[in-house]
Image (cartoon, rainbow, N blue to C red):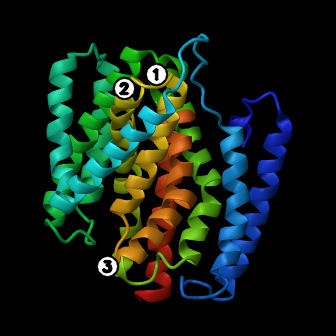
């Protein structure tokens, strides 16, 4: 946890350690007594212990974008209207394309990259390519995918992940936000060892969220029913890397470009982060309209928003560890509790 001591107010760090420890104890106890389904009434205990972790985390990892000079104010009415337009457009796009929207994103990213013609150094290309390759290889075993084959899914992850990272970094650098710490990679700024430490920190940091995910029923059936072998939980590297790439590093900067026309960068970026967190959650929701709404609010508030804060306001590698650990533990529990 020492890597998070970047704030002058160490009381926040101590508060986070306290609520993090309590959450781990309570969630581990819930698992020990058999709480692994959303239908169980004690699910709300998990929510209640996770909420303080989220609140303190958001205070601890703050928006690093500097306040702009006085004079540029947010046009609240116009920004609200633009948010509504963006949300409606995203919902319509998902309604028309469904999961095939992921096939469109690499094309969009490629076009943007051609238009921007950014000056990307060799290290960025190599690192983005390595992460894309890991996501692609892991994706070959993603047997929960049904709209295309797992092999097609694995191959899709390479351009999707690679181009999302390159476009995201390019946009953030051009506007000056990457230089302020938004969406930074610990590997690119500090090297391999600090990046590995950040990944491990993400695992440690994300443990309450990973346990809460299992407590709330993520390991039961559905997406985790395919887990039958010891190695399959490692497929968590695919969503852990790829979803941080397109869900955070690509989509948030793109939406931010629209919002910054009506608001200072700091406000516009945080607004884009929130909008995309709930849209990302919506993509993972299923069922009737009421179920989708409830799932979107729960997934977005409890899981996607914290991951987005870590990725965009702290560093990429911590977010990958955080995200990987949530899916990895889900698959491990599915293997040993339900699928043997």
Q: Is residue 241 left or right of residue 58?
A: left
Which sits earlier in the primary sequence, circle 2 or circle 1? Answer: 2
Q: Mark 3 falls on what kind of element?
A: loop
Task: Report how far apart the C-alphas of labels 3 and 2 lie in the structure.
Answer: 35 Å
Seen in the picture, residue 279 relative to 78 is either above or below; the reply is below
Task: Return the residue nearer the eye: 34 or 133.
Answer: 34
User: Label 3: which residue?
Assistant: 226
Q: Position of residue 195 (x, y in %)?
A: 52, 35
Disc 1 packing (10 Å; few <14; some 14–19; many ≥20): some
Q: At 16% across and 59% down in the image, what residue appears?
A: 96
User: Which residue occupies 50% across, 63% down?
Assistant: 297
* Residue 237 visible somewhere in the drawing: yes
- In space, the residues marked 2 and 1 are separated at their CA atoms by 7 Å
- Asked if labels 3 and 1 touch by Cβ distance under 8 angstroms, the answer is no
Pointer 1: what residue? 178
Corner quadrant of residue 3: top right
């Amino acid at each position: 946890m020492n890597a998070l001591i970047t704030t002058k107010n160490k009381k926040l760090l101590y508060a986070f350690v306290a609520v993090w420890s309590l959450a781990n104890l309570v969630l581990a106890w819930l698992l020990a007594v058999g709480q692994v389904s959303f239908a169980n009434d004690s699910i709300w205990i998990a929510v209640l212990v996770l909420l303080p972790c989220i609140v303190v985390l958001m205070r601890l990892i703050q928006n690093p974008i500097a306040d702009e000079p006085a004079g540029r104010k947010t046009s609240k009415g116009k920004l609200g209207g633009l948010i509504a337009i963006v949300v409606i457009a995203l919902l319509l796009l998902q309604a028309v394309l469904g999961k095939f929207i992921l096939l469109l994103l690499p094309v969009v990213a490629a076009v943007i990259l051609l238009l921007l013609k950014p000056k990307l150094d060799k290290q960025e290309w190599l690192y983005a390519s390595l992460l894309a390759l890991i996501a692609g290889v892991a994706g070959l075993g993603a047997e929960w995918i049904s709209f295309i084959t797992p092999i097609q899914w694995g191959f899709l992850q390479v351009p999707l992940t690679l181009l999302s990272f390159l476009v995201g970094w390019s946009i953030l650098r051009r506007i000056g936000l990457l230089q302020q710490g938004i969406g930074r990679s610990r590997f690119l700024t500090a090297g391999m060892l600090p990046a590995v430490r950040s990944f491990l920190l993400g695992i440690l940091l994300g443990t309450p969220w990973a346990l809460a995910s299992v407590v709330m029923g993520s390991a039961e059936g559905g997406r985790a029913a395919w887990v039958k072998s010891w190695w399959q939980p490692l497929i968590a590297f695919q969503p852990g890397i790829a979803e941080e790439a397109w869900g955070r590093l690509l989509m948030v900067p793109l939406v931010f470009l629209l919002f910054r026309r009506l608001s200072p960068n700091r406000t516009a970026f945080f607004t884009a982060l929130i909008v995309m967190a709930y849209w990302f959650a919506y993509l993972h929701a299923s069922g009737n309209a009421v179920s989708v709404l409830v799932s979107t609010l729960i997934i977005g508030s409890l899981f996607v928003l914290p991951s987005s804060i870590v990725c965009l306001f702290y560093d990429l590698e911590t977010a990958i560890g955080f995200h990987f650990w949530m899916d990895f533990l889900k698959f491990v529990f599915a293997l040993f509790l339900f699928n043997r």
